[in-house]
Amino acid sequence: MKKLLVCALVILFAVSVTAVSSFAQEEDTTYVYGEVVSASSDAITITEVAFDEETGEEVVSQATYTIAEGAEVENADSVAAIPEGEAVDIEVIEIDGKKHAKYIYVYSETDEEQ
């Protein structure tokens, strides 16, 4: 009985460590804005627009993000269905040193009118 209890505690500890490391992995979330250059089911490339706080100027660069497993897309049927030139916001998480798109918001024409 004592061995069973110790075994159960070891398993519980292992599961909790895994859950904590997964949670910590998602804490490093960043958000980017830009226009779609290309999109497929496994990656999205955008022209990013950022603000340089030192110079006060916009900085434009191109970046590609792998689509995270279970990623959500709003205002499009899928990532691959997002047309070139469409404005998007992307929630980015880092997994194993690689940036993944976890959530993609596609701006619609009604968003731009408001």
Image: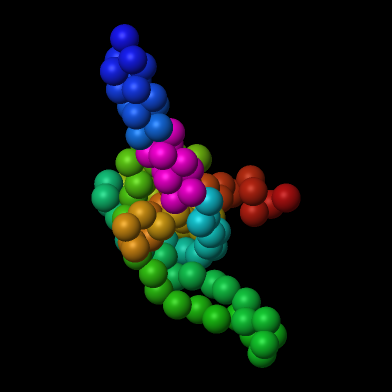
Look at the image and give the residue range highlighted in magenta. Answer: 15-25
Query: Residue 102's x, y, as percent?
Result: 43, 47
For the point 44% across and 50% down, which residue is it? 25
Is residue 20 found inside the magenta-colored segment of the image? Answer: yes
Residue displayed at 64% across by 85% down: 57
Image spot of residue 68 (x, y percent):
35, 47
**How many marks overall?**
0
**Residue 54 falls within the magenta-colored stretch:** no
| Nearest to the observer: residue 20 or residue 8 | 8
Q: Going by the picture, which residue comes out furthest to the bottom?
A: 55
Q: Is residue 48 left or right of residue 37?
A: right
Q: Nearer the viewer, residue 35 or 17?
A: 17
Residue farthest to the top, as pictured: 1
Does residue 74 appear in the picture of this structure? Answer: yes
Q: Position of residue 45 (x, y in %)?
A: 36, 63
Kindly report the secondary structure that dominates the magenta region of the rendered protein: helix
Residue 40 position in % (x across, y down): 28, 51
Q: Residue at x 56, y 47 (%)?
A: 108
Relative to 1, is 40 above or below? below
Q: How is the image coloured?
A: rainbow
Image: 6 above or below 85 = above
Residue sitting at the far right: 114
Q: Quadrant of residue 7?
A: top left
| Viewer-nearest residue: 62 or 4 | 4
Residue 95 as seen in the image, left or right of residue 54: left
- Does the image show residue 90? no
Q: Is residue 106 above or below residue 2?
A: below
Task: Give the residue furthest to the front.
Answer: 2
Quarter of the image containing the N terminus?
top left
**Residue at position x 67%, y 87% in the image:** 54
